[in-house]
């Protein structure tokens, strides 16, 4: 079983002291702090300068970003491809819609239920998914998204026998006097988005986030260092589904519609989430948000011309895969590294052994 | 009683018998080398101990426990760590994070704890400090925040060694640690292995083709051929064993 590898003559001396730059103590990242404060200020001020229709679009960006972040946790960080997240989104949407329309719940109270229910179904899908990888997993989960509207049709009957539920306008109204309905909904979405992105950020830079990445990159090595691979994969599925389910509930809140009358609508959702992740940058925190912004922008530009939206999206996807294989965030990072390299290069002698930021994906060490 | 006790292990892949009733034991604190021609079954033996391969027959006892009853991810928890022949690092993570993944079993924080940051900050600080110390020990401290991807092969070998140490193992399995290193590096590596064994109170089982290193650091050598043990003993005993010489050089026609 042991194959003798040949000696690598060009391997640099490993036990000599490498000459790379020492990772010095990090200064206060002023630029980042200023940038963060500006972004937060713009996000908070935004709804006051726009009409209700525009604020609704902002909210659509946010629930799309939330669902894309869910898929990003699973596919970007844990390496499990899912085309079924439209179904988890749909579960959240119909949970919120059924509880408000049929049972008179306050819609805000349905959000946690939607997330938990989607997570439970996520676990149910996550276990059989342990046996599948790559395209097979994509295909099976795709079936989930296609199947979902059919299941809904069996159990949900809206007006006219169509599986479509619409909460009353009063049910998605503002709960405070000083904010109009659209501004209130914007802040609810913004608050949820901020919290969920913060939770995701905490997760991926902690112990379990490292474990998710380890399982993605080297499953065998991950198990030999003591990571319960099955446990990590199923948890990733559940959390990811919870994000999508919460996003689905928010979509009912924002658009006042849970619709399963179109048989491929949740399949289309799945593809949207995946495109948002890939365009924005998989395995990054900002990626899903940027991807969702771009996706909605493209959709707005092509409103009314039915054929244009898929064409533009497809075009954008191809351009990103060729020019920015690690998405917008990856591209920005490389641009920043290049810029730093230039400014550092003019001040000090060039770094003799730069860690090459390469466009090619890291090779599997085996 | 030996720390690792391998008894009559048999592994078959279809009709191919990779291990054919292999038995040996490794005492606590020893450095034991598995040597033999290519295809003798050395790495297969490692994969049986780390539970990546199923043995069709035989027993492995580690520290009094039936090792073959445990799932692969429990092996690290009872104190067995390993490196891989062709490296199995996590290229997307930094050098420090690679070692921190190695210390996975030293932490407790789960998914929800990580997300809500309940008790995770303290644990992260502790793991970070410990892993930095291990990196310093392996002279990798200055690379801690670099991504593992793109570093030279020899550096990555040391990083994998560091990752294995991070779980505080009792038994360390090294699969061809000198493979791909230059002569100077191999001498250095031999010293490192000995020092690390003393410092971390380790028992080491290694597969290695680099004979001068094997002879200089091992207490015991197990020689394998075609899945069987053909000789066993101290470096001096093995060196002059005619069976060993025959396995390596063949018999005169």
Image (cartoon, coloured by chain):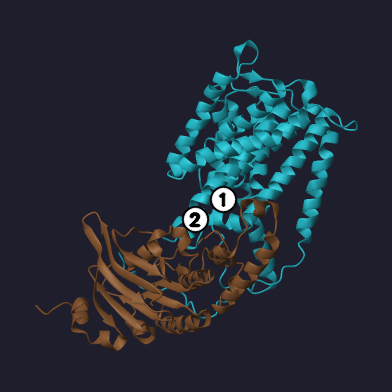
Chain colours: A cyan, B brown
- Residue B228 in the figure: left or right of residue A279: left
Q: Position of residue A296 (x, y in %)?
A: 67, 34
Residue corresponding to mark 1: A77
Q: Position of residue A19 (x, y in %)?
A: 57, 76
Q: Residue at x 38, y 77 (%)?
A: B2
For the question of whether residue A294 can be seen, the reply is no
Q: Position of residue A272 (x, y in %)?
A: 59, 34
- Residue A36 in the figure: left or right of residue B33: right
- Residue B245 in the figure: left or right of residue A98: left
Q: As rendered, which of A308 and A207 lies closer to the eye?
A: A207
Query: For mark 2, does the 10 Å Cα neighbourhood hold few (<14), some (14 to 19), or many (20 or more) residues?
Result: many
Q: Specify the farthest residue to the bottom.
A: B236
Tell me which chain the residue with mark 2 is part of: A
Mark toward the start of the polypeptide (2 vs 1)? 1
Mark linked to residue A217: 2
Placement of A88 over or under A366, stated as above or below: above
How far is mark 2 from mark 1, CA to CA?
Answer: 9 Å
Q: Residue at x 11, y 80 (%)?
A: B252
For the question of whether residue A22 can be seen, the reply is yes
Q: Residue at x 76, y 62 (%)?
A: A29
């Amino acid at each position: 079983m042991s194959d003798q590898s040949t000696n690598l003559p060009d391997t640099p001396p490993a036990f000599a002291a490498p000459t790379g730059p020492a990772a010095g103590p990090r200064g206060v990242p002023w630029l980042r702090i200023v940038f963060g404060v500006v972004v937060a200020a713009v996000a908070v001020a935004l709804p006051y300068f726009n009409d209700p229709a525009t604020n609704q679009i902002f909210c659509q960006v946010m629930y799309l970003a939330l669902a894309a972040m869910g898929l990003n946790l699973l596919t970007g960080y844990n390496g499990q491809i899912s085309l079924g997240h439209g179904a988890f989104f749909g579960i959240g949407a119909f949970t919120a819609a059924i509880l408000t329309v049929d049972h008179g719940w306050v819609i805000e109270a349905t959000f946690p239920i939607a997330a938990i229910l989607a997570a439970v179904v996520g676990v149910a899908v996550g276990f059989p998914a342990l046996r599948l990888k790559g395209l097979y997993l994509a295909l099976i989960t795709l079936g989930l998204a296609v199947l979902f509207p059919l299941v809904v049709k069996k159990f949900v009957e809206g007006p006219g026998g169509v599986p479509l539920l619409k909460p009353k306008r009063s049910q998605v109204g503002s709960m405070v006097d000083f904010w109009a309905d659209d501004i209130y909904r914007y802040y609810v979405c913004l608050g949820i988005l901020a919290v969920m992105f913060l939770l995701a950020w905490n997760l991926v830079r902690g112990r379990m986030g490292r474990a998710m990445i380890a399982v993605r990159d080297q499953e065998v090595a991950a198990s030999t260092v003591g990571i319960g691979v099955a446990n990590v994969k199923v948890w990733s599925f559940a959390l990811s589904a919870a994000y999508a389910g919460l996003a689905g509930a928010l979509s009912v809140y924002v658009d006042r519609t849970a619709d399963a009358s179109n048989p491929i609508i949740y399949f289309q959702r799945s593809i949207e989430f995946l495109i948002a992740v890939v365009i924005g940058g998989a395995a990054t925190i900002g990626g899903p948000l940027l991807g969702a912004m771009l996706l909605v922008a493209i959709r707005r530009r092509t409103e009314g011309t039915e054929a244009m939206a898929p064409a533009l999206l497809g075009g954008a996807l191809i351009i990103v895969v060729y020019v920015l294989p690690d998405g917008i965030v990856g591209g920005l990072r490389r641009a920043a590294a290049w810029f730093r390299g230039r400014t550092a290069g003019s001040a000090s002698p060039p770094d003799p052994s730069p860690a090459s930021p390469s466009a090619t994906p890291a090779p599997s060490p085996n | 009683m030996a720390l690792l006790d391998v008894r009559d292990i048999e592994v078959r892949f279809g009709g191919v018998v990779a291990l054919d009733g292999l038995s040996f034991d490794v005492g606590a604190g020893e450095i034991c080398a598995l040597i033999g021609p290519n295809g003798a079954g050395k790495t297969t033996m490692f994969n049986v101990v780390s539970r990546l391969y199923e043995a069709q027959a035989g027993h492995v006892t580690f520290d009094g426990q039936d090792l073959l009853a445990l799932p692969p991810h429990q092996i690290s928890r009872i104190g067995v760590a390993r490196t891989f022949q062709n490296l199995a690092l996590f290229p997307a993570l930094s050098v420090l994070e690679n070692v921190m993944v190695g210390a996975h079993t030293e932490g407790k924080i789960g998914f929800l704890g990580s997300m809500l940051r309940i008790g995770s900050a303290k644990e992260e600080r502790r793991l970070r400090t410990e892993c930095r110390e291990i990196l310093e020990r392996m002279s990798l401290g200055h690379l801690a925040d670099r991504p593992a991807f793109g570093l030279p092969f020899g550096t990555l070998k040391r990083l994998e060694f560091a990752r294995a140490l991070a779980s505080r193992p009792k038994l360390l399995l090294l699969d061809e640690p000198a493979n791909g290193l230059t002569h100077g590096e191999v001498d250095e590596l031999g010293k490192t292995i000995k020092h690390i064994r003393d410092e971390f109170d380790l028992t080491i089982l290694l597969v290695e083709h680099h004979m001068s290193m094997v002879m200089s650091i091992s207490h015991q050598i197990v020689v394998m051929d075609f899945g069987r043990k053909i000789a066993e003993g101290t470096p001096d005993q093995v060196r002059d064993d005619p069976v060993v010489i025959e396995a390596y050089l063949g018999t005169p026609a």
